[in-house]
Image (cartoon, rainbow, N blue to C red):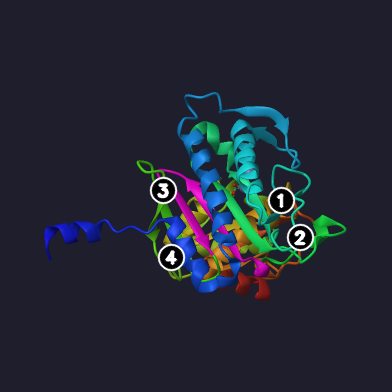
């Protein structure tokens, strides 16, 4: 094969935009371009956030914004910036009917004509905020639903759907490189940001989670307050009951811990604790999107009672316990639950 052709073929890249358009043509022909236009709003916002993060040490964007959010947590300046970037980019997409953010107590609604305002988007604009000032990976998480035909009455109840109804979900992890991972219900795909071009390029085609890993991820400091079955399960992992040795890895940014789990296998656990009896992680913009991605990649996600994606939400900021990861580890946890034994 002539060199030029080899070089040309080796440089054929698939951008996130192209991929999303292909997915849309294949699976959402009736979307008429609104779905890909919507996702382009998200990728644009994440590129704005990553640019700020890369300059964080130089610009005055580190540290607290001096406010607390609806969760009662101190907002970091980058929480506020990321939230504004997503609200701004998505409000310009007229297919968006409602936005629900971790940083906003109430949903943000748009007065759209019924036939255009189709989608409801939940997002955690900046996940892992406590790690920003110490230069540890953080992320953005999003979850997309089709809205009800007519948004009337109580918006909150209108948008509360089980995770199984998601049409798409994804996250961006701002780490040693910036990687976007998303699913539209037909597999999971990863794109690495090429900073020279400012474009997300396909790097993980049809991502599959290993059936079993060798790492578990939990905040060990809280272990004495976990329900007994969680403590027994962790003991199984530590003592080789699943047929292999495990290492403990905990970044403290859900997106970073999940990204490692989807690539290497294993399990991430945020149980009920003394401080968070219903778990700390939020169902609609943390657990649901990652559960959808995990399931699409061959993994599992449960709250200890049922699959995460089967939970019928009752509140937009509700919290849930989360056990998510490879089939072997999560099924062993469910076995421990059913038998109450380890
Ligand atoms: P956020 O920064 O969006 O509030 O999320 C923080 C979450 C999640 O990223 C992480 O897994 C968890 O908090 C860590 O909690 P602990 O510090 O209690 O372990
Ligand atoms: Mn978060
Ligand atoms: Mn957050």
Would you say the residues marked 2 and 1 are in contact, meaning their CB atoms lie under 8 Å apart? yes
Name the spot of residue 60 as percent of width and height, x first: 55, 23
Q: Quadrant of residue 129?
A: top right
Residue at mark 1 = 100
- The earlier-in-sequence mark between 1 and 3 is 1
- Residue at 44 percent of width and 64 percent of height: 213
Residue at mark 4 = 207
Residue at mark 3 = 199
As rendered, which of 25 and 207 lies closer to the eye? 25
- The earlier-in-sequence mark between 2 and 4 is 2
| Quadrant housing the N terminus | bottom left
Residue farthest to the right, as pictured? 153
Answer whether residue 16 is visible to the viewer in this image. Answer: yes
- The earlier-in-sequence mark between 2 and 1 is 1
> What is the CA distance from the residue labelled 4 to the residue labelled 1?
28 Å
Ligand 3 under 8 Å from disc 2 Cβ: no
- Within 10 angstroms of label 3, few (less than 14), some, or many (20 or more) residues? some
Image position of 246 with respect to 68: above or below: below
- The earlier-in-sequence mark between 3 and 4 is 3
- Within 10 angstroms of label 2, few (less than 14), some, or many (20 or more) residues? many
> What is the CA distance from the residue labelled 3 to the residue labelled 4?
20 Å
Magenta stretch containing residue 125, yes or no?
Answer: no
- Within 10 angstroms of label 4, few (less than 14), some, or many (20 or more) residues? many
> What is the CA distance from the residue labelled 3 to the residue labelled 2?
32 Å
SS state under label 1: strand
Left or right placement of residue 327 versus residue 124 in this view: left
- The earlier-in-sequence mark between 3 and 2 is 2
Name the spot of residue 258 as percent of width and height, x first: 52, 55
- Nearest to the eye among marks 4 and 1: give it: 1
- Residue at 43 percent of width and 65 percent of height: 207
């Amino acid at each position: 094969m002539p060199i030029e052709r080899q070089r040309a073929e080796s440089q054929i890249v698939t951008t996130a935009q192209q991929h999303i358009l292909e997915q849309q043509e294949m699976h959402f022909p009736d979307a008429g371009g609104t779905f890909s236009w919507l996702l382009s709003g998200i990728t644009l916002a994440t590129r704005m956030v990553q640019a700020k993060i890369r300059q964080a040490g130089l610009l005055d964007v580190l540290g607290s914004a001096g406010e607390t959010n609806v969760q009662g947590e101190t907002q970091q300046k980058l929480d506020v910036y990321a939230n504004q970037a997503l609200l701004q980019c998505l409000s310009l997409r007229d297919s968006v009917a409602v936005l629900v953010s971790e940083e906003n107590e109430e949903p943000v609604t748009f007065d759209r004509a019924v036939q255009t305002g189709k989608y409801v988007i939940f997002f955690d604009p900046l996940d892992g905020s406590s790690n920003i000032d110490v230069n540890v990976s953080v992320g953005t998480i999003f979850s997309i639903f089709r809205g009800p035909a007519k948004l009337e009455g109580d918006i909150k109840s209108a948008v509360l759907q089980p995770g199984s109804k998601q049409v798409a979900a994804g996250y961006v992890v701002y780490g040693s490189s910036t990687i976007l991972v998303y699913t539209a219900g037909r597999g999971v795909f990863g794109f690495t940001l090429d900073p020279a071009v400012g474009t997300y390029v396909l790097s993980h085609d049809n991502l599959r989670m290993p059936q079993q890993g060798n790492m578990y991820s939990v905040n060990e400091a809280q272990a004495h307050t976990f329900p007994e079955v969680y403590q027994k399960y962790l003991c199984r992992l530590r003592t080789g009951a699943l047929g292999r040795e495990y290492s403990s890895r905990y970044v403290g940014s859900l997106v970073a811990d999940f990204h490692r789990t989807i690539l290497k296998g294993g399990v991430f656990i945020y149980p009920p604790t003394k401080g968070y009896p219903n778990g700390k992680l939020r169902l609609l913009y943390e657990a649901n999107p990652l559960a959808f991605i995990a399931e699409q990649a061959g993994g599992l996600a449960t709250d200890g009672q049922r699959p995460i994606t089967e939970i019928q939400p009752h509140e937009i900021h509700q919290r849930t316990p989360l056990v998510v990861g490879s089939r072997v580890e999560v099924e062993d946890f469910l076995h421990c639950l059913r038998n109450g034994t380890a």
